[in-house]
Image (spheres, coloured by chain):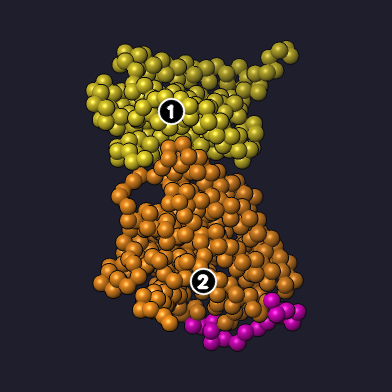
Chain colours: A orange, B yellow
Amino acid sequence: MRNPEQILGIIFQLTQLLLVVLAAPLLTGWVGQCQAWLQNRSGAGLLQPYRVLNKLFHKDAVIADNASWLFRITPYIVFGCMWLAAAIIPIIAVDLPFSRAADVIALVGVFALARMFIALAAMDIGTSFGSMGARREMLVSFLAEPALLMVLFTASLISQSTQLTHIVETFAHHRFILYPSLAFAGIAFVMILLAENARIPVDNPSTHLELTMIHEAMILEYSARHLALIEWASSLKLFAYLSVGIALFLPHGMIEVGNWAGLPLAMGLLCGKMLLAGAGLALLEASMAKMRIFRAPEFLGTAFLLGVLGLLIHFLLGA
Amino acid sequence: MQIPLILQFVNLLASLLLLVVFAMLAQRRILSLINLFAWQGGILALSTFVVAYSTAQHHLYYSAGLTLILKVLLLPWLLHRLIRKLNVRWDVETLINIPTTMLVGIGLVIFSFNLAAPISQLSEGITRGLIGIALASVLLSLLMMLTRRKAVSQVVAFLSLENSLFFAATSATQGMPLVVEFGIALDVLVATFIFGIFFFQIRETFESLDITHMEKLKDD
């Protein structure tokens, strides 16, 4: 038997799931639009990602002769992982039914699972670009992952819990405290976000220049609905990362499950935060140049060290 | 556990100071190094101001103003002029590569936090933990002096060392007498001038600012 609270929780969970999956391409479109404005172009508009997805879904998929089942199922797994991640993170409401299923460490694991499958699928075809992209992706991600964990541990130490829900509640609902350690964690998190989402100093999402691409090199062989799912998953990943950032560093305005009256305000706040974050991301990308791939370890090493420094500062100052 | 908001702000500024020192340690370009030095001065001035406000010590206001004028405006301007005249906007060459330097830096931070922990227990109120950060900044500045090859970046490291010491003084002992501060400020200014003259001398004698050239002196 389910009591009404559980049903309410599931309704909120479904609302969040639908909202995220529908709004994620919009965020990508917004970032692209901001970049276009910063480069003095008129831009393709906010709805461009939807048009691309629509176009891709209506095409016939072409699959290489020597592709195995791994290649076929990877887009679904990647999309599923990102959607699951978006379900775990408190985006509009805290204490959703799914959020109890996994803590931040499991969340990092979900991202890692998607990454592993996409790298394997890239190698599966046997083209040189695919395996080069896969190896580069692994180089970037094996450095980014410990840094991400350090950032999450800093927040976990402050809130005494690895559950994102508890972290959000600690930061949002208690009285205002300045956490110096979170300043370090915040900078580290932005660096990790740029690296993990194939953004400019590490990778360029809009390039097809063979020497520089990482993410694009891995998905070169995909077409039609498979490509659409992977693009959509990339949007979801960006959305999920920004949501984690919001949950850790700017969680004010999230509502409890069942608070219908607060829902419009929470949605509005989320929109505002996402707009700001997207614009900030575009500005950050516009102000930086793409690094050489061999600088990426240094970049991510710095992120890791900042994460460690945040932890140390937490131990020293107790805040 | 709960400390007043203003002291939390001082803690935040202290952490930012440490962050800037780390950024300087990781910085390759000499221009950015000087800009970071100016930022460090700005944070120092702000933290001095906040300490002055929270402890109601009026002479610290002068100290903050002095820091602002000297370390945010005058010294960076002098250094900018120097590198323009010396034409040394090249990348800074480090002796050890930067990730290794950063790792050593983390080790130093852990060391100084450990070292300062018993001292922090003794002191009361505002200074808890700040001594550790100040000590870490001092050691990191020393590390930067050791790992840089060019004379200009060594001087910036020296000035950063002085900043860290100044921070330790204001946060831990709530400021020195104003006369002493004036003296130190003057010393730093004069030192920078003398360093500037030295740079020209070094370059004229060795045709480079790379201090490894100085080691060849004995061979002649």
In the structure shown, which secondary structural element does the residue marked by tag 1 occupy?
A: helix
On the picture, is A121 further left or further right than B85?
Answer: right
Residue A66 position, x and y percent, is: 75, 79
* Mark 1 belongs to chain: B
On the picture, is A14 further left or further right than B96?
Answer: left
Which residue carries the number 1 mark?
B121
> Could you tell me if residue A253 is visible in this image?
yes
Asked whether A39 or A254 is in front, the reply is A254
Whole-Å distance between the Cαs marked 2 and 1? Answer: 46 Å
Give above or below for A228 relative to B120: below
> Could you tell me if residue A47 is visible in this image?
no
Give above or below for A85 relative to A283: below
Quadrant of the drawing holding the N terminus of chain A = bottom left
Name the amino acid, label 2.
Leu
Residue occupying image coordinates x 63% and y 60%: A137
Identify the magenta region.
A54-70
Residue B51 position, x and y percent, is: 30, 29
Which residue carries the number 2 mark?
A84
Label 1: few (<14), some (14–19) or many (≥20) C-alpha neighbours in 10 Å? few
Residue B40 position, x and y percent, is: 41, 33
